Amino acid sequence: MKLGIGARITALFGLGALLLSILMGGLSYFTTRHFLLAGRETAAQQQAFGNALVVRSSLLSGDTQYVTLLASIDAGTGAHSILYHQSKAYVSSLSANSASIPTKLRQAVLAGSAATETYRTTEGTAEIVVGVPVPSVHAFYFEVFDLSDLDHTLRVLGLTLFGAGVVTTLLGVGLGRFASERSLRPLAAVSRAASSIAGGELDTRLDPPAADPDLEGLTNSFNAMVDQLQERIEREARFNSDVSHELRSPLTTLAAALEVLEADRDKLPPRSQRALQLLSDDLRRFQRMVGDLLEMSRADAGSVAVFLEEVNVSELVQRSVVAGFGHMDGQGGGAPPTVRVDPGVQTWRVGVDKRRFERVMVNLMENASHYGGGVTEIAVGPGDGDRVEVTVDDAGPGIEPQERSKVFERFYRGSASGRRGTGTGTGLGLALVAEHMRVMDGDVRVEASPSGGARFVLSLPVLADGDEPGGEA
Amino acid sequence: MSGRILVVEDDERIRSSMRLALEGEGYEVRDAASGEEGLDLFAEAPTDVALIDLMLPGMDGFECCRALRRSSAVPIIIVTARADTHDVVAGLEAGADDYVTKPFVAKELAARIRALLRRARPAEEEPGALTFGDLQLLPEQGVLRRLNGEEVHCTRTEFRLLCELAASPNKVLSREQLLDRVWGYDYFGDGRLVDVHIRRLRTKVEADPAVPQHILTVRGMGYKLVP
């Protein structure tokens, strides 16, 4: 796994602090140890030489109470003495043992030279032994000093230094974290700005760094990038609007000219009348297609301004069905479907763009008549939570569960609908239904109708219940 | 029905087809290819309805509307390529009375013109004189004036809207009702027409348009006039 830059900075600071504390701690430990030990050795040597003189004078005076002598020397010093005289070893106490003297040192002393050695006994206690030959009386005097107090001091020192090292390392990690957060803060600001731009707020810019020349480059180039992006998006939106204007102008001319001809329809010969009928039918369809395509491209550009009005939902659906039925493409006369309204939702109000909602109903009714054998029922009823649902059922074969989400994709032709369709739609009808519902805070889904066909369900949030909502605004 | 219509449209083909269609409906049509030319034509002869495309070279449709409004209360219909932009609101705020979207159907355009001409003439059942605040509304004379005699200028649509509200003081009228009575729209009329006209009216009759005292919004319901 690759570590993030923040974690790496933190780790680097922690590692630096660790190495530094090992170095400093090690240095102080070994220096202290060296000085303490050297001091103790010097003191031990002085004491041993002094005691050797005492032993020499005692032996010269013919005293043979060796053990008493050694005990009196040891008294109050905490050291143990060992005396070799006439090939016999005498010890000052039971805890002192001639065997504990390192062989090498003993041999050196027996050979006639004084020696000092620090060692650790098999029990683990540190000791200094000083060996002094006393040639005038043919004796060899050894004195063993216990170093366990020094050992203890050094152990405490070591522990203290180790603790200090741990604390230093943790402080280093903390400092690293702080530093990385501080240095990454501008990046977090960039990330926030970028996501707000991605969310559509193109006016977002980074604040120029107040007193940080290091960040000026980043800020300037980021803002320059957003400027360019915004310009491109606006250029594209302008282009779309220009295209829409260019496409609509000839359509407007055609429609107006055709209406002049239609006003004089009766004066035309029958063949021309039929041609005129074809022209006007297809012109209407062409207008619908251009309208749908532009609607979709606008939705993509995010340049849709929606005007939501609070209206009574049952009236909205009834009016939309009646008006929409008249606007349907290729409907063969007849009466518009009736709308069944659940008495519980009679007074519910929703926020919609009425003309968008009418397009939704037109598209659903057209879809039902093209691919579903016609509308069987339109109903308004309560949905989950604070929502109201409008259902449009058809008499077709229904839509397979795996195709249900796909029917709202653009230009989607289902396996069944492809065969049954008359090919008059733009392929955008249901995609636009989904888009219209989305901008009105609603949604659409398809399920199976109890009668076997497909059921399209529109769901909208309910704003208020009743005809007397709110007060003054 | 006859009427004199001024068409300001830069696309020559649309201009010709509109002229054909409107003349077919019995109107007298004059057309201009730019806002400047339109203003000249307007000054030359009386006009009953002005039809102005928003996208014009040079002086754009908004500016053309504002220029017309400075000197006249003539009904203005703006022609826009898109209904779901702020262009519509901006055009209405510039003084337009109504709008149509391209590609429009000539029949629909003729219906819009008819509605405007109808209401440009005195209506049959007018409310009586009504006084609210320091204003006096005299529907039969088509006059709105302050109590000190100073006349408040408003367009015919604004005046008509005020008369509808004044006809039933203290009673809430929904957007749909107002769209039907003032503009002749059915249920699917654009509520923004009402909203913008109410805003325009408030700047003329309210002491502080941000805190209206007479023309009140009833949220989710509509508007009412409180004398």
Image (tube, coloured by chain):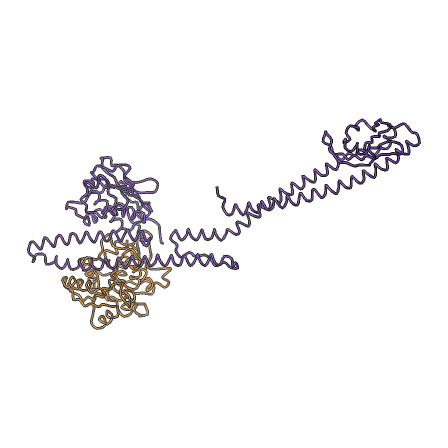
Chain colours: A purple, B orange
- Residue A175: % across, % down: 58, 48
Please determine whether, in this image, residue B151 is positioned above or below residue A294: below
Q: Among all residues in the image, which is located at the extreme left?
A: A269
The location of residue A306, given as percent across then percent down, is 31, 53
Residue farthest front in this picture: A111
Q: In which quarter of the image is residue B105?
A: bottom left
Query: Relative to the observer, which residue lies in front, A465 or A104?
Result: A104
Query: What residue sits 72% from the left and 29% below the top?
Result: A122
Q: In which quarter of the image is the C terminus of chain A?
A: bottom left
> In screen coordinates, is A402 left or right of B210?
left
Q: In which quarter of the image is residue B89?
A: bottom left
- In this view of the protein, which residue sits in the foreground, A342 or A202? A202
Measured from the top left, where is residue A252 in percent x and y? Answer: 20, 59
The outermost residue toward the bottom is B44
| A79 w.r.t. A171: above or below | above
Q: Which residue is drawn at 55% across and 45% down?
A: A11
Position of A84 relative to A301 (above/below): above
Judging depth in this view, the residue of A277 and B221 nearest the camera is A277
Please say whether residue B3 is visible from this viewpoint.
yes
Q: How many dots with numbers?
A: 0
Residue B86 vertical placement versus A16 (above, below) = below
In the image: residue A444, left or right of residue A82: left
Q: x%, y% of residue B123?
A: 20, 62
Residue A125 or B24: which is nearer the viewer? Answer: A125
- Residue A369 seen from this side: no
